[in-house]
Image (cartoon, helix red, strand yellow):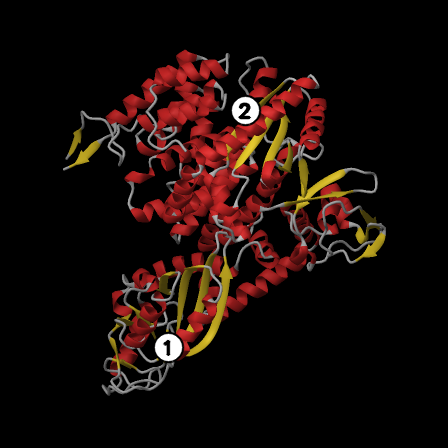
Amino acid sequence: MLRQSIGDQKRLSGEPYIIHPLQVAYILAGLELDTDTLCAALLHDVVEDTDTTNEDLVKEFGESVAEMVSGVTKLGKLQYTTKEEEQVENYRKMFLAMGKDIRVILIKLADRLHNMRTLKFLSRDRQIANSKETMDLYAPLANRLGIYSLKWELEDLAFKYLYPDEFHEIVKGLDKKRDERLAFIDKIMDEIRLELKKVRITAEVTGRAKHIYSIYRKMQRDNSTLDQIYDLFALRILVNSVRDCYAALGVVHDLYTPMPGRFKDYISVPKKNMYQSIHTTLIGPKGTPFEVQIRTWEMHRVAEFGIAAHWAYKEQSNKGKKKAVIVKEDKLAWLRETLEWQKDTENPDEFMNTLKKELFEDEVHVFTPKGDIKVLPRGSTPIDLAYAIHEQVGHRMIGAKINSKMMPIITQLKNGDIVEIITSDSAKGPSRDWLKFVKSSGAKTRIQQWFKKAQRAENIEKGKEILEKDIKKIGMKHSDLFKPEWVQIALDRYKYNSVDDMYASIGFGAISAAKILARLLEEYKKEHKEEDLEKTITELANKKTVTKPSKTGVVVEGIDNCLVKLSKCCNPLPGDQIVGYITKGRGVSVHRTDCANIKDLISEENRMIDVYWANERTTNYSVEITVFANDRQGLLSDVIKEITGAKFNILGVNTKTTKERIAIIELTLELENLDELNKVMNTLKRIESVYEVKRNK
Amino acid sequence: MKEDTVEKNIEDVIKLAKEKNRHIDARKVMKAYNYAKAKHRRSKEIIR
């Protein structure tokens, strides 16, 4: 029975739900946004959380508001195979909406910021998950859009929940010497103000503490303690004109010695996100370094509000006419390229990886022989530059000169390189190998599109071949699966107009054959629910009941001599609770009862069969585990020492360290049973700086 | 960081919006606020 409530909806914090949209709108009002954005912010959850439809919003508030709300509303109707796929599709939807109207992402960022401000009301798991997503996606996005006021706060909040100890340590450390540092910076500011006044430059000189997360990153990067970081404060000089920026730079360089290699002029070469400023680090009294940023008021506004500042300008220049701003400015080329690129990929992991790479990408500035500056992602090659100049330059490229010397076209470019692209009309077009070297998504997209167009026939053939091979692999025939109505379902799901389009897409690598196959199999299963299965089960059941273990050490209840495989998805070990699944023509596959895959299959009850571990030991088993630790010298050696010391065999090691200096060590071990696994995991947990050891699924 | 800041009400939002952008249509913003508030209030249905 449904009962109409008289109360308000409440958030986990206990506050009425309307408080959240209000705070989101307040953040956006601070960014000088317009009426429709504020309305969309206030309404941003109504479609997702209430019975309101998008049409209702169009009627009440107009297309623009309704479209923005739709852009931030999560997808609800489509069915996805995994949670990750669903999440990526939501990101993809958000990015598409952002391509139409950049204000969508501003609402999403403000929404995230308020959620982060109230994160303490959530469980620790959710705090970590949300903070990770903020650090991985939303803060870099704010950075890319140049909205530093949001970026810093998002990072500091996420940092606080991800690394609470480190966060509080820095805060405590900053408070301790606060007065001393303030006195230092006040003195410097007074000196600069005085000198600027003497040369008649009107300026505002302010000092600010650096953000906590940026201090932490610096400590990690330089392997230093808080006491060893001197430029915890940065000075900012705001002036009226570009000419005054350079004049003020002269003044401060006259007053203090500049630190070599610490000067950046983002005024003459702005960042991709439109940021402009001069940065210089100077040596102050007693040799203490401090950073100074010099920019105009307008540049400052752009630095704080980023794309939002740009948007507000467009609106003013339209004299209040309400118009969605299409992302077409060159300065947002990266976004446009990402959106272009994402149309060509169906693989969610690849989409997310490229998106994250794009967001974190550092830049390199190179020159054309005519002196034009091109900004490319770090690690770019002359191929990236050729495509950044023009698609046809890329397609016709046959070589490159870097600083007047002929160089391989896969050479990584450095800041300040002068690069000449050599083209020929008789060039055969790009090579597939180029895709391995290019860094910019723009170049990648254009090369892929070239192959898509130029080699369609070849791709169709290749796609057919790949799909046929995969069908054979699962022991089926083309005719079993290719019923027109099932094929149509797959075409609709992945938005292909024809079967040839689908084959071409497989051949060209935009979608995997396995994905198409999964869709077709789903339909097949619906129709052939039990037919073949009955046969297999009868065959198995008719066999003699001799409980002899297979080579894997697993006994299949009542069946001897049947093919038994330990599934690779969960790598079961003696001691694990296990269950058997009768596959089609490939014997019994053994899974852990907590395996995610078996949970999906559990509905097919009559394919499940009881299995258990034999008492006698028949073999060793490979198990994959992952160790998470704060990186330190000698960590890997300690891990290996502990394992070998306990007389366990290591079959493989794979290590990496994240930007946050988290060491991730993946180990493949040879073990006899679960007890051994528990023993080794407990041993590893005791190693200094290790905070988590988990068995891979 | 502004964790635990004082919550803003709709008057605060409109006041700040007007300070920052003189083209703001306060009536439309207020309408959106009232609409959202009513919708969220109505939607809390409990299955018994």
- In the picture, the quarter occupied by the C terminus of chain B is top left
Quarter of the rendering containing residue B11: top left
- The answer to whether residue A100 is seen in the rendering is yes
Report the disc number at residue A324. Answer: 2
Quarter of the rendering containing residue A52: top left
Label 2 packing within 10 angstroms: few (<14), some (14-19), many (20+)? some
Describe residue A648's horizontal placement relative to residue A104 as left or right.
left
Describe residue B47's horizontal placement relative to residue A71 as left or right.
left
Report the disc number at residue A647. Answer: none
Report the disc number at residue A565. Answer: 1
Which residue appears at 68% of the width and 20% of the height?
A: A241
Residue A452: where, in percent of width, then height? 65, 52
Residue A278: where, in percent of width, then height? 66, 32
Residue A282: where, in percent of width, then height? 64, 37
- The answer to whether residue A102 is seen in the rendering is no
Which residue appears at 35% of the width and 19% of the height?
A: B33
- In the picture, the quarter occupied by the N terminus of chain B is top left
**Gap between marks 2 and 1 measured at Cα:** 58 Å
Label 1 packing within 10 angstroms: few (<14), some (14-19), many (20+)? some
Which residue appears at 30% of the width and 73% of the height?
A: A679
Amino acid marked by disc 1 = Lys
On screen, A121 above or below A451?
Answer: above
Quarter of the rendering containing residue A158: top left
Describe residue A408's horizontal placement relative to residue A492 as left or right.
right
Residue A604: where, in percent of width, then height? 28, 64
Amino acid marked by disc 2 = Ala
Q: For numbered disc 1, what is the local secondary structure?
A: strand
Viewer-nearest residue: A350 or A648: A648
CB of mark 2 within 8 Å of CB of mark 1? no
On screen, A132 above or below B1?
Answer: below
| Lower sequence index among marks 2 and 1 | 2
